[in-house]
Amino acid sequence: ANFVVFIYEGGDGANEPWSVDSYLLTDTDLPQVWRWLRRNLPVDSCWSLGVVVDPAYPTPESKVKVDWILGADVLNAHPHHRSPSDQTVAEEMLARRNGLTLP
């Protein structure tokens, strides 16, 4: 399968914006994605993971359609623009960011 990983850093203060990097992991499986995260995930960061459902063979330049399996891309949205459920997800991601453990 093909996956997209978003890694969120910063955003600790009211005026500090989030920094977000995205990575395309192609032709892989979840165990390989977990290994990649263990090697590449910065300290004090949050992440979300999605499965690329279109196109079948994405490139870094592709516009991709993603189904989320872990996390959500809610941390970029200002808290005032989040739905109540998105706010809950964002708060849970922030609560886990300092104690993240991978399977």
Image (cartoon, rainbow, N blue to C red):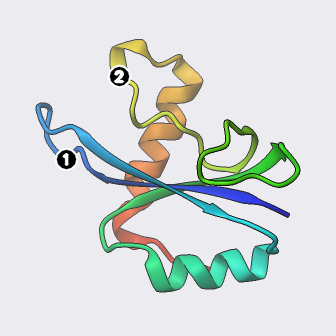
Say whether residue 8 is left or right of residue 9.
Answer: right
> Residue at the location (68% across, 75% down)?
33
How many marks the image carries: the answer is 2
> Residue at the location (88% across, 50% down)?
56
Picture layout, residue 47 above or below residue 67: below
Local crowd at mark 1 within 10 Å, few (<14), some, or many (≥20)?
A: few
Quarter of the image where one finds residue 13: top left
Is residue 103 visible to the viewer in this orientation of the structure?
Answer: no
> Residue at the location (40% across, 72% down)?
99
* Image marks 2 and 1: residues in contact by CB distance under 8 Å: no
Q: Nearer the viewer, residue 29 or 26?
A: 26
Picture layout, residue 86 above or below residue 83: below
**Picture disc at residue 29:** none
Q: Nearer the viewer, residue 65 or 8?
A: 65
Local crowd at mark 2 within 10 Å, few (<14), some, or many (≥20)?
A: some
First-in-chain label (2 vs 1)? 1
Say whether residue 97 is left or right of residue 47.
Answer: left
Q: Amino acid at mark 1?
A: Asp
Q: CA distance from mark 2 to mark 1?
A: 13 Å
Q: Nearer the viewer, residue 96 or 76?
A: 76
Residue that badge 2 annotates:
79
Residue that badge 1 annotates:
12
Q: Position of residue 51 (x, y in %)?
A: 77, 52
Quarter of the image where one finds residue 55: top right
Quarter containing the N terminus = bottom right
Q: Position of residue 74 (x, y in %)?
A: 49, 33
Picture layout, residue 94 above or below residue 79: below
> Residue at the location (50% across, 57% down)?
47
Q: Nearer the viewer, residue 29 or 93?
A: 29
For numbered disc 2, what is the local secondary structure?
helix
Quarter of the image where one finds residue 46: bottom left
